[in-house]
């Protein structure tokens, strides 16, 4: 799909490489002490037997694998798998969500020096396409974490009937979402598959790290499995009921726990139409909801008027598209999902 050959201008790679080598050398100088077999003896370049012939850089020690991720959950999952074995850098600032992100020249620079790029996939990261071309990094391995995961078509989600296209017609221009809803990470079962895809991608890029990636992934998968069991247990009494979130991020979550997800708008940046408001009011009344679930990235409180009309409260369901400084840690996903569960149960009146 993406063709690096079309890149109009190549970023000069030789300028980048020494930076990577330098950081690896610094790491050696810091921590290893006597265990480091004289890092200064750079003559034995053949020691790195796996280095391809095109790479004269394998002097002394293997540079740490440089992995770039796109946004929060992808970073959380990738860090869980990588552990200390690779350096994981998130492309987006944590306080900016991926739906409307505009790439910067700095982003192209990050991709130019990276070994691996991990993305959510399903057109969540529309900014990547031109960006990968501009980075001009023919060696960059792109890991699509959505590979093989069962998807839900955007047009099959109730509430999209207000779009300009009628059923059976081509989708109208002007909406940001792709053919499939991209929010797979909010279903712990699908999140597990994403973690497996990321594990396999890192192993492909760094085969020697296989034991580390496999063990790290297994530990995190265990935690996701426990999370999923908790959700199954606690949401079981509410099967068939509808909950309301701000934007359209919950169809996979709902599907996984036999709930129905209703939403006010497609993407957080959008304004609600009168039909949107009507849909939400009906859903809230039918399921006798106690709260409507907004999200941290919302500007202001889009539910305040609605909640007042319905005489209900407003709390959060955090889709983790934005977050604070600690939000890139693997643990953050688990903590946030448990809080989401708590708020959701409260919305159903428990
Ligand atoms: Zn979203």
Image (cartoon, rainbow, N blue to C red):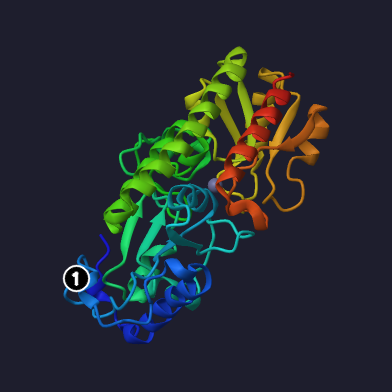
Please state the horizontal and vertical placement of residue 256, each as a whole percent of the image.
48, 25
Q: Residue furthest front?
A: 34
Please state the horizontal and vertical placement of residue 255, each as a whole percent of the image.
48, 26
- Residue 283: image quadrant is top right
Q: Is residue 166 visible?
A: no
Between residue 80 and residue 192, name the one nearer to us. Answer: 80
Q: Residue furthest left?
A: 53
Position above or below: 81 against 252 = below
Between residue 279 and residue 291, name the one nearer to us. Answer: 291
Position above or below: 318 against 45 = above
- Badge 1 crowding class, 10 Å Cα cut-off, few under 14, some 14 to 19, many 20 or more, is few
Q: Dividing the image into 4 quarters, which one contains the N terminus?
A: bottom left
Position above or below: 196 against 232 = below
Residue wearing tag 1: 52
Q: Is residue 202 visible?
A: yes
Q: Secondary structure at mark 1?
A: loop
Q: Dividing the image into 4 quarters, which one contains the C terminus?
A: top right
Between residue 227 and residue 122, name the one nearer to us. Answer: 227
Horizontal placement of 125 versus 267: left or right?
left
Residue at image coords 43%, 77%:
25
Position above or below: 243 against 193 = above
Residue at image coords 32%, 44%:
147
Horizontal placement of 117 versus 249: left or right?
left
Residue at image coords 43%, 60%:
86
């Amino acid at each position: 799909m993406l063709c690096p050959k079309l890149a109009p201008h190549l970023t000069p790679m030789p300028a980048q490489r020494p930076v990577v080598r330098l950081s690896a050398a610094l790491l050696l100088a810091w921590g290893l002490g006597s265990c480091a077999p004289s890092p200064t003896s750079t003559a034995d370049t053949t020691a790195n037997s796996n280095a391809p012939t095109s790479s004269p850089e394998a002097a002394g020690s293997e540079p740490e694998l440089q992995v770039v991720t796109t946004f929060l959950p992808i970073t959380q999952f990738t860090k869980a798998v990588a552990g200390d074995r690779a350096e994981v850098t998130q492309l987006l600032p944590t306080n900016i969500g991926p739906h409307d992100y505009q790439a910067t020249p700095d982003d192209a620079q990050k991709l130019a020096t990276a070994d691996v790029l991990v993305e959510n996939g399903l057109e969540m990261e529309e900014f990547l396409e031109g960006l990968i071309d501009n980075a001009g990094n023919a060696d960059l391995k792109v890991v699509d974490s959505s590979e093989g995961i069962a998807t839900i078509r955007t047009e099959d989600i109730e509430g999209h009937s207000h779009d300009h296209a009628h059923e059976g017609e081509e989708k109208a221009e002007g909406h940001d979402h792709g053919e499939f809803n991209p929010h797979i990470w909010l279903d712990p079962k699908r999140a597990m598959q994403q973690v497996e895809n990321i594990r396999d991608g890192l192993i492909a890029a760094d085969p020697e790290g296989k034991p580390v990636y496999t063990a790290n992934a297994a530990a995190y998968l265990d935690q996701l499995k426990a999370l999923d069991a908790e959700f199954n247990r606690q949401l079981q009494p509410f099967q068939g009921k509808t909950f309301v979130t701000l934007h359209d991020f919950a169809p996979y979550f709902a599907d996984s726990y036999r709930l129905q997800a209703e939403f006010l708008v497609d993407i957080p940046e959008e304004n609600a139409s009168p039909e949107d408001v009507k849909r939400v009011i009906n859903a809230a009344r039918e399921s006798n909801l106690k709260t409507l679930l907004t999200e941290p990235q919302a500007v202001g409180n889009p539910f305040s008027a609605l909640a007042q009309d319905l005489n209900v409260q407003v709390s959060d369901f955090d889709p983790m598209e934005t977050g604070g400084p600690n939000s890139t840690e693997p643990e953050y996903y688990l903590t946030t999902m448990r809080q989401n569960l708590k708020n959701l149960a409260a919305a159903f009146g428990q």
